[in-house]
């Protein structure tokens, strides 16, 4: 019902017009019923227009909620990922992926999430990039080839990779996706613009 509020409907001129049309048809139906004239057609039109507005606002609310949930899931992936960073002596230390800086070297094994955007410097592995690209088939990433770039948030399916982080915190592909999802607004259709 909150989506049916006139202030909310005013954000979408088409839905506002349909809502006003529903209200007017409802008024006409009441007037006709009081004066003894046939009122069924007006009432049916008012009901259809009201349902149209209700379904449109419900669909828009659903899309907004889905976008917020998707952004939240992406943020959780970024903040929950623990990286195995290599120290200068070659030892591994566990750090949150948000602590990684360009030039840091990390090791990622099968089943682990790649903690940040980077370039493979040692090893070869199949990587599941479906969370980013939507492509269900895993891709091969290996050092020294044109396919050595990896994206944070993807999962290594086999073997082990050593990579160098190339993106600043807050500027990775995953961060840009989060900003896009959060800032996404439905663009008006050409009919709405007209």
Image (cartoon, rainbow, N blue to C red):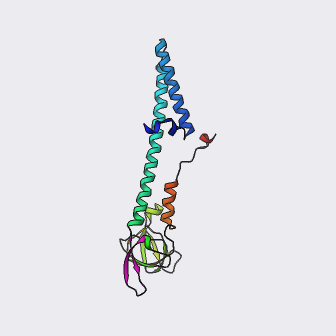
Q: Residue at x 43, y 46 (%)?
A: 62
x then y, percent, for residue 171: 52, 67
User: Is residue 86 visible to the viewer in this orientation of the structure?
Assistant: yes
Instruction: Specify the quadrant that holds the C terminus.
Output: top right
Q: Quick check: is 95 in the magenta stretch? A: yes
Q: Residue at x 46, y 14 (%)?
A: 34
Q: Quick check: is 141 in the magenta stretch? A: no
User: Is residue 114 visible to the viewer in this orientation of the structure?
Assistant: no
Give 51 or 77, whichever is nearer the viewer. 77
Residue 159: image quadrant is bottom left
x then y, percent, for residue 85: 41, 78
Span shown in magenta: 82-97
Vertically, is 114 above or below 12?
Answer: below
Q: Residue at x 46, y 15 (%)?
A: 33
Q: Residue at x 50, y 22 (%)?
A: 27
x then y, percent, for residue 59: 45, 43
Give 108 or 79, whichever is nearer the viewer. 79
Instruction: Specify the quadrant that holds the N terminus.
Output: top left
Vertically, is 41 above or below 12?
Answer: above
Give 101 or 135, whichever is nearer the viewer. 101
| Residue occupying the far front of the picture | 7
| Residue occupying the far right of the picture | 194
| Residue occupying the far top of the picture | 36
The rendered magenta stretch, by its main secondary structure, is classed as strand
| Residue occupying the far bottom of the picture | 89
Badge count: 0
x then y, percent, for residue 109: 37, 75
Left or right of 133: which side holds 188?
right
Vertically, is 85 above or below 3?
Answer: below
């Amino acid at each position: 019902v909150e989506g049916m509020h006139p202030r909310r409907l005013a954000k979408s001129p088409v839905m506002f017009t349909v809502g006003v049309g529903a209200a007017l048809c409802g008024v006409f139906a009441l007037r006709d019923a009081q004066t003894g004239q046939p009122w069924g057609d007006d009432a049916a039109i008012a009901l259809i227009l009201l349902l149209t507005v209700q379904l449109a606002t419900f669909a828009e609310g659903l899309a907004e909620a889905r976008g917020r949930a998707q952004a939240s899931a992406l943020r959780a992936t970024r903040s929950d990922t623990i990286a195995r960073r290599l120290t200068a002596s070659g030892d591994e230390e566990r750090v949150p992926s948000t602590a990684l800086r360009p030039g840091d070297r990390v090791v990622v094994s099968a089943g682990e999430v790649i903690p940040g955007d980077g370039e493979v410097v040692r090893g070869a592995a199949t990587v599941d990039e479906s969370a980013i690209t939507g492509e269900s088939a895993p891709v091969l990433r290996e050092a020294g080839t044109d396919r050595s770039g990896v994206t944070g948030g993807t999962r290594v399916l086999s073997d082990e990779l050593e990579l160098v982080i190339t993106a600043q915190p807050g500027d990775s592909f995953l961060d840009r996706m989060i900003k896009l999802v959060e800032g996404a607004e439905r663009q008006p259709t050409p009919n709405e613009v007209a």
